[in-house]
Amino acid sequence: MFEGLSDRLSGILSGLTRRGALTEADVTAAMREVRRALLEADVALEVVRGFTDRVREKAVGAVVLKSVTPGQMVVKIVNDELVAMLGTEAETVDLNAPAPVPILMVGLQGSGKTTTTAKIARRLSEREKRKVLLASLDTRRPAAMEQLAVLAQQVGVESLPIVAGQSAVQIAKRAMDAARFGGFDVVMLDTAGRTTVDEALMAEAAEVKAATNPHEVLLVADALTGQDAVNTARAFDQRLGVTGIVLTRMDGDSRGGAALSMRAVTGKPIKLVGVGEKVDALEEFHPSRVANRILGMGDIVSLVEKAAETIDAEQAMRTAEKMRRGKFDLEDLSMQLAQMEKMGGIGGLMGMLPGMGQIKKQVEGANLDEKMFKRQRAIISSMTPQERKNPDLLKNSRKKRIAAGSGVKVEEINKLLKMHRTMADLMKAMGSGKRGIGQALGSM
Ligand code: GDP
């Protein structure tokens, strides 16, 4: 499962990680390929569309962290969106209700419902030490009732004695009574399946639900049926209010579409997955682990996570230290401008910073808008590293060169330098605590 998709996605993404820089066009082209790969894996169209749109939007707007490449950032974004698509947190069968907790098992015939009922019973009994009672409600297929009884014995839990001639609701009520009387913790009700979703099947399950008020309604669906599994889940959910999904045959060579679309389409979590015919072939569904298995790029993801954790703290400390020592240079100013631009709109931000309103007034004629910040950053990027560190180097000939390089007039460079000087002085004053802000501004 997921092999084909995994190969495709890692091919597309390692193409991106190898490059030094990425353009919006690169990301768009890669997303086109990701889209095709997901569709070929049988992921629902609506889910694919939302997925690639969100990745593209985030990738284009992302600020690339130091020490990782843009391609690695894209891998991280794709990973996070995959995890979100799969449901983010792992969820398991919830038994948080007064005993005996009724669990209703629903699904199509052949989906693996009876086997899964036994697998879950085994898990609850062995791992969580719960006393579990199994009951088959499949009144039309005596063989199914026998099958559940055999499986119950195999996994070491009890099953309700079979009484011929009872309706599904009667059996369900008998099971609840027996469980109360016998001190059981959990009652699993294995409803009858049909080969297709039909009204009689739904009506019977709805009646049982009304009679027993189950704490969980688990839908069992076959991963090999791809989008049909998702449509089945939707139909059952609309009629019965499903609380969780168990996807079976995840050990088969399904393309993965059901597992990938299920959560996004139905809004219901995949709680467990069946990975074989044996009674212990049942696993929890962890979105982050599944995403990792699909992308196979866990090391890049953790690299970016680590970079993101350290970068903010590092940068803030460096800037604070420079401010304290009055060493706020043009490089720092450029970074601050980029930060302001990222925060969108400077108007509100200026109003919030002490002293900024003053600067705004005093830097005469300055049009403090985002365009100006962009131009100012362009000016700074036309300077040499030495000039950025030491603005005093900027005499007329250098200013002319920078003006030509960034397409502005020398006047504008002077304005930028004045603004930097003011900010640097202000910061030094605040850092040393020797002079007030008013005094620093007064010296402009
Ligand atoms: P039901 O009609 O929905 O109750 O289906 P069953 O529980 O009788 O299962 C039908 C077949 O699918 C049986 O042969 C099971 O062993 C098999 N089966 C169930 N779950 C899985 C699974 O996760 N993987 C594989 N490979 N086979 C499974």
Image: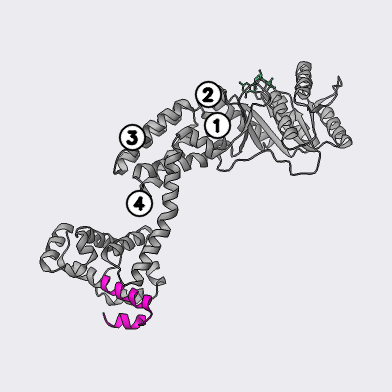
Secondary structure under the numbered disc 1 in the rendered image: helix
Q: Quadrant of residue 53?
A: top left
Q: In x, y percent, where is residue 396?
A: 11, 68
Q: Residue at x 50, y 36 (%)?
A: 291
Label 2 environment density (alpha carbons within 10 Å; few <14, some 14–19, many ≥20)? many
- Going by the numbered disc 2, the residue's amino acid type is Ser
CB-based contact (under 8 Å), mark 1 and mark 2: yes
Please give the residue where the numbered disc 1 appears in the rendered image.
259
Residue 53 makes an appearance in the image:
no
- Going by the numbered disc 1, the residue's amino acid type is Ala
Q: CA distance from mark 3 to mark 4?
A: 20 Å
Q: Residue at x 32, y 38 (%)?
A: 18
Label 3 environment density (alpha carbons within 10 Å; few <14, some 14–19, many ≥20)? few
Q: CA distance from mark 1 to mark 2?
A: 9 Å
Secondary structure under the numbered disc 4 in the rendered image: loop
Residue 364 makes an appearance in the image:
yes
Read off the magenta span.
419-444
Q: CA distance from mark 1 to mark 3?
A: 26 Å
Q: In x, y percent, where is residue 77?
A: 43, 43
Disc ID at residue 326: none
- Going by the numbered disc 3, the residue's amino acid type is Gly
Task: Say which label, 1 or 4, has the lower sequence index.
Answer: 4
Between residues 263 and 378, which one lies in front from this camera angle? 378
- Going by the numbered disc 4, the residue's amino acid type is Lys
- Of discs 3 and 2, which sits in the foreground? 3
Q: Looking at this rendering, what residue extends furthest in the right direction?
A: 181
Please give the residue where the numbered disc 4 appears in the rendered image.
66
Task: Say which label, 2 or 4, has the lower sequence index.
Answer: 4
Please give the residue where the numbered disc 3 appears in the rendered image.
15
**Image: 387 above or below 121:** below
Q: Is the CB atom of the residue marked by disc 1 within 8 angstroms of ligand 1's nearest atom?
A: no
Please give the residue where the numbered disc 2 appears in the rendered image.
254
